[in-house]
Image (cartoon, rainbow, N blue to C red):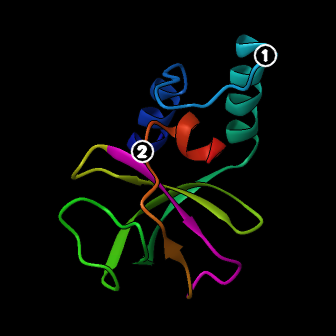
Amino acid sequence: MVDPAIERLERSLSDPTGVYIGSGVDADTYLAGLASDIRANVCAPFPLSATIMAPGFPGAQLGSAISGLCVAHRAGYWLVYQAEQDRFCCFWGETRSNLGAHGVFGQPLYCWSA
């Protein structure tokens, strides 16, 4: 049985909303590469928290904690799903106990490309 957070992630990987695609870059190839990289770094979801840092998140205070389920991870980069808000966001940092959340949220392709 697939975890609901992973199911939501998979359903969202076709939405390129917010992804910047540079001039001369083939959009389909770039987006497929992002989706492939996310899939290669998917993990069993686990709870994860980070400290909100500038520019922050709507309705949240800088310095407070934000949390969700980590659904993909690679060196210093954590893709987190927040079921309550039905959104993905990114946390950054090498140490799981000391992560920062810098206001990047939306679709997973956008978050992963940030």
Is residue 21 covered in magenta? Answer: no
* SS for dot 1: helix
Q: Which residue is mark 1?
A: 29
Q: Which residue is mark 2?
A: 5
Q: Is residue 22 above or below residue 66?
A: above
Q: Are there few (<14), some (14-19), or many (20+) residues within 10 Å of tag 2?
A: many
Q: Quadrant of residue 28?
A: top right
Q: How many discs mark residues in the rendered view?
A: 2
Write the residue at 42% across / 60% down.
103
Residue at image location 54% in from the left, 45% down from the top: 111
- For the residue marked with disc 1, what is the amino acid? Thr
Inspect the magenta stretch and tell me whether residue 92 lies in it: yes
- Residue 95: x and y in percent read 66, 84
> Which residue is found at the position 55% from the left and 79% from the top?
99
Question: Which range of residues does the magenta coloring cover?
Answer: 87-97
The secondary structure type at the circle numbered 2 is helix
Q: Is residue 1 visible?
A: no
Q: Decide if residue 112 is on the left or right side of residue 18.
A: right
Quarter of the image for residue 36 reads top right
- What amino acid is found at the position of numbered circle 2 in the picture? Ala
Estimate the spatial distance between the alpha carbons at disc 2 and disc 1, rounded to whole Å.
25 Å
Crowding near the residue tagged with mark 1, few <14, some 14–19, many ≥20 C-alpha atoms within 10 Å: few
